[in-house]
């Protein structure tokens, strides 16, 4: 994404160095925000049309599509300079963990609808608010906590450390070295 690289290049030097030092975290957050909006749009499109009586199914479908987009964006942009695992093994671990995450994100909605029968006595406006709180706030908090733990424990364990933590001689790269790596020149 040349736009982001241009934007970072125009930042004042101290801010640029900070951004370059944390470029993966910033990209990961941008990918997460993008897939959150995508997930939300697909969910509401489905719940207001073909899956109106089945919000849990709509949440699982939207979560699955957002997970696929999330993997593609993270693999091809946010973490494009990382490696260490074969692509199919990395994808398998990512999607298994994310699949459990999608189920966790849908769990509060399932409980509200199937245990407490919440949909039967709410207006459309109340349903939109309740679905958002249960499916996207509470559900995503459960999913994020699980994914953070599981990805660190299983997908990217400590024995696959990179850079200085893994014994690299480049313990403190300069901003230019980070920028070269970011642009694929390293």
Image (spheres, grey):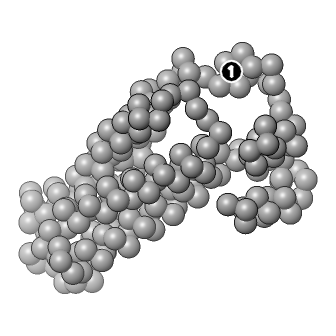
Along the viewing direction, whichever of 106 and 164 lies nearer the viewer = 164
Q: In the rendered view of the protein, which quadrant contains the N terminus?
A: bottom right
Along the viewing direction, whichever of 142 and 64 lies nearer the viewer = 64
- In the picture shown, does residue 111 fall above or below 177? below
The reply to whether residue 127 is in sight is no
- In the picture shown, does residue 42 fall above or below 124? above
Dividing the picture into quadrants, the one containing residue 159 is top right
Along the viewing direction, whichever of 89 and 158 lies nearer the viewer = 89
Q: Is residue 121 left or right of residue 146?
A: left
Residue name at image x 41 percent, y 31 percent: 89
Q: In this view, does 81 lie to the left or right of 159?
A: right
The reply to whether residue 5 is in sight is yes
Residue name at image x 91 percent, y 53 percent: 13
Q: Is residue 27 left or right of residue 66?
A: right
Dividing the picture into quadrants, the one containing residue 140 is bottom left
Disc 1: which residue: 165
Give x and y (percent) for residue 133. Answer: 33, 65
- Residue closest to the far right: 13
Q: In this view, does 94 lie to the left or right of 15?
A: left
Give x and y (percent) for residue 182. Answer: 74, 46
Q: In the rendered view of the protein, which quadrant contains the C terminus?
A: top right
Give x and y (percent) for residue 156. Answer: 50, 29
Give x and y (percent) for residue 100. Answer: 29, 42
- In the picture shown, does residue 133 fall above or below 52? above
Q: Label 1: few (<14), some or many (≥20) within 10 Å?
A: few
Kind of element beneath mark 1: helix
Residue name at image x 80 percent, y 63 percent: 6
């Amino acid at each position: 994404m040349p736009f982001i690289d241009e934007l970072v290049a125009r930042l004042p030097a101290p801010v640029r160095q900070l951004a370059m030092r944390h470029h993966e975290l910033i990209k990961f957050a941008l990918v997460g925000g993008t897939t959150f909006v995508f997930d939300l749009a697909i969910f509401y499109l489905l719940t207001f049309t073909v899956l109106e009586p089945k919000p849990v199914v709509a949440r699982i479908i939207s979560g699955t599509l957002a997970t696929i987009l999330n993997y593609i964006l993270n693999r091809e942009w946010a973490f494009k300079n990382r490696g260490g695992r074969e692509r199919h093994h990395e994808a398998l671990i990512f999607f298994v963990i994310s699949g459990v995450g999608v189920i966790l994100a849908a769990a509060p909605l399932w409980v509200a609808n199937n245990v407490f029968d919440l949909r039967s006595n709410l207006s459309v406006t109340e349903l939109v608010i309740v679905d958002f709180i249960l499916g996207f706030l509470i559900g995503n908090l459960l999913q994020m906590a699980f994914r953070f733990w599981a990805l660190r424990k299983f997908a990217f364990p400590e024995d696959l450390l990179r850079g200085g933590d893994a014994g690299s001689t480049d313990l403190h790269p300069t901003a230019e070295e980070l920028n070269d790596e970011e642009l694929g020149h390293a």
